[in-house]
Image (cartoon, rainbow, N blue to C red):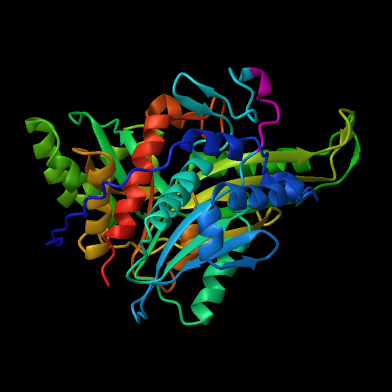
């Protein structure tokens, strides 16, 4: 059974202006893809802005740099503590908006506040979560409060480009003997769930995440004039390979986390669907196949997914291409491996002239427990920020920096305390990204409850 837990009430007023602070963050275009091309000025400016917005944090919490822009703030207890620390994470880089500007109702980097919402790139992913976290710390420092165990605030500058800073931070701190009691990063949120018979909002907390791979397919062919083709060209051979992997999806597998999600949903579903969810949580083979018919979201929970995202080949319409390449983006299901994925791709393509090469890859993570004190703390903190909203385990299908901690931390979770309906979620990496000010206020309460609820 999960331990019972009640977050301590914190009636201290939060300082005003949280929306304005997030808007100021949004106005600095910390696009990590552009920093890779040499433009680090926005990141320098953003680090300076944090010192301006959070003076108490910078006065009392030493900050260590990892790489050029990775930041780790250390908050020590007022009295010596041998307890394992807590790692609270966020990233401040954002994805580009190139090609989307005309589809935004509000320019993406103006940081406007419109109709009680803060608009702009990063409002939800992930500057909104970073803002409520740092606001909570600043407010607690203003009340002369200190945590009962060490707290590490780990802020990443390159999560959106699968950068190395998050891995570097986790690896180096582990080498120093840090084994966190709790790691908490982005991933889930306060959402409405598109499952039959389940209504209302839920706090979806990721217990694990799928692996991520970039795989290149490449081949060569005899060049020449296109007026005299001599059989299958390099482009044709590659197109056939891509067609084969699309026609042969990976096998289905139900992770324990998805089973736990269904069991939790059963308690909040209407009578008929609730009975089905209870049965589904136990009948793994059947449930995995039923989720496939629930659309792409359901299929992503039970199968390694594959998407060809880039194709290149040829130099002119009338020249036979001498080479061609394709890039596959693959999300590896829990219980599978990157090596197994590569082996299956080669088997399905069945063409020795096509080279299959992993460009980068991370294994799927272990599955953290929903039945421990750490998850109980998250659940209680949700009740502080969003009273009446149930907390549900789920599988994170995207990649986060938290994956680098799973090798040596037993309790790693993914949840940003912001409310996102379907329309708002569509703005993440898309157009019109925005967050409600009320959600920021509630998110700050959530993080204060997390910190004040930490055991000694």
Left or right: where 95 falls relative to 340 = right
Q: Say above or below: 421 vs 137.
A: above
Question: Relative to the observer, which residue lies in front, 292 or 396?
Answer: 396
Q: Residue at x 15, y 60 (%)?
A: 2
Q: Quadrant of the N terminus?
A: bottom left
Left or right: where 123 falls relative to 294 = right
The secondary structure making up most of the magenta span is: loop
Q: Residue 445: horizontal and vertical position, in percent?
A: 33, 45
Visible residue check, residue 350: no
Q: Residue at x 58, y 48 (%)?
A: 92
Location of residue 425 by image quarter: top left
Q: Residue 174: horizontal and vertical position, in percent?
A: 49, 77
Q: Residue 299: horizontal and vertical position, in percent?
A: 37, 40
Give the magenta part as a residue range.
96-102
Question: Relative to the observer, which residue lies in front, 188 or 90?
Answer: 90
Location of residue 353 by image quarter: bottom right
């Amino acid at each position: 059974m999960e331990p019972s837990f009640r977050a301590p009430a914190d009636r201290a007023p939060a300082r005003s202006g949280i929306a304005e602070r997030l808007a100021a963050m949004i106005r600095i275009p910390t696009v990590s893809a552009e920093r890779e091309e040499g433009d680090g000025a926005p990141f320098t400016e953003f680090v300076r802005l944090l010192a301006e917005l959070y003076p108490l944090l910078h006065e009392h919490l030493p900050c260590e740099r990892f790489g050029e822009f990775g930041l780790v703030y250390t908050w020590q207890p007022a009295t010596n503590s041998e307890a394992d620390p807590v790692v609270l994470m966020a990233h401040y880089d954002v994805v580009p908006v190139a090609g989307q500007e005309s589809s935004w109702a509000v320019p993406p980097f103006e940081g406007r506040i419109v109709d009680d919402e803060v608009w702009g790139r990063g409002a939800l992913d992930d500057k909104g979560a970073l803002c409520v976290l740092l606001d909570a710390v600043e407010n607690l420092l203003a009340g002369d409060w200190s945590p009962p165990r060490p707290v590490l605030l780990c802020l990443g500058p390159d999560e959106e480009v699968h950068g190395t800073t998050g891995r570097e931070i986790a690896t180096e701190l582990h080498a120093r003997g840090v084994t966190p009691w709790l790691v908490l990063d982005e991933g889930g949120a306060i959402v409405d769930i598109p499952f039959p018979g389940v209504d209302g909002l839920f706090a979806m907390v990721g217990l694990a995440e799928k692996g991520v791979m970039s795989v290149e397919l490449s081949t060569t062919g005899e060049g020449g004039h296109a007026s005299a083709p001599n059989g299958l060209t390099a482009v044709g051979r590659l197109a056939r390979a891509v067609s084969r992997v699309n026609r042969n999806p990976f096998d289905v597998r139900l992770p324990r986390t998805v089973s736990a999600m269904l069991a939790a949903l059963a308690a909040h579903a209407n009578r008929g669907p609730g009975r089905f969810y209870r049965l589904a949580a136990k009948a793994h083979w059947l449930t995995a196949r039923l989720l496939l018919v629930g659309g792409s979201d359901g299929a992503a929970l039970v199968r390694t997914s594959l998407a060809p995202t880039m194709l290149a080949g040829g130099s002119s319409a009338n020249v036979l291409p001498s080479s061609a390449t394709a890039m596959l983006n693959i999300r590896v299901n829990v219980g599978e491996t990157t090596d197994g994925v590569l082996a299956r791709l080669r088997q399905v393509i069945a063409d020795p002239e096509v080279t299959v090469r992993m460009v980068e890859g991370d294994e799927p993570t272990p599955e953290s427990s929903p039945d421990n004190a750490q998850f109980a703390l998250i659940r209680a903190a949700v009740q502080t920020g969003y009273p009446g909203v149930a907390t549900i385990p789920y599988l994170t299908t995207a990649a986060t920096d938290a994956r680098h901690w799973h090798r040596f931390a037993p309790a790693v979770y993914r949840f940003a305390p912001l409310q996102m309906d379907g329309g708002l979620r569509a703005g993440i990496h898309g157009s019109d990204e925005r967050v409600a000010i009320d959600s920021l206020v509630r998110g700050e309460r959530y993080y204060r409850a997390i910190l004040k609820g930490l055991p000694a």
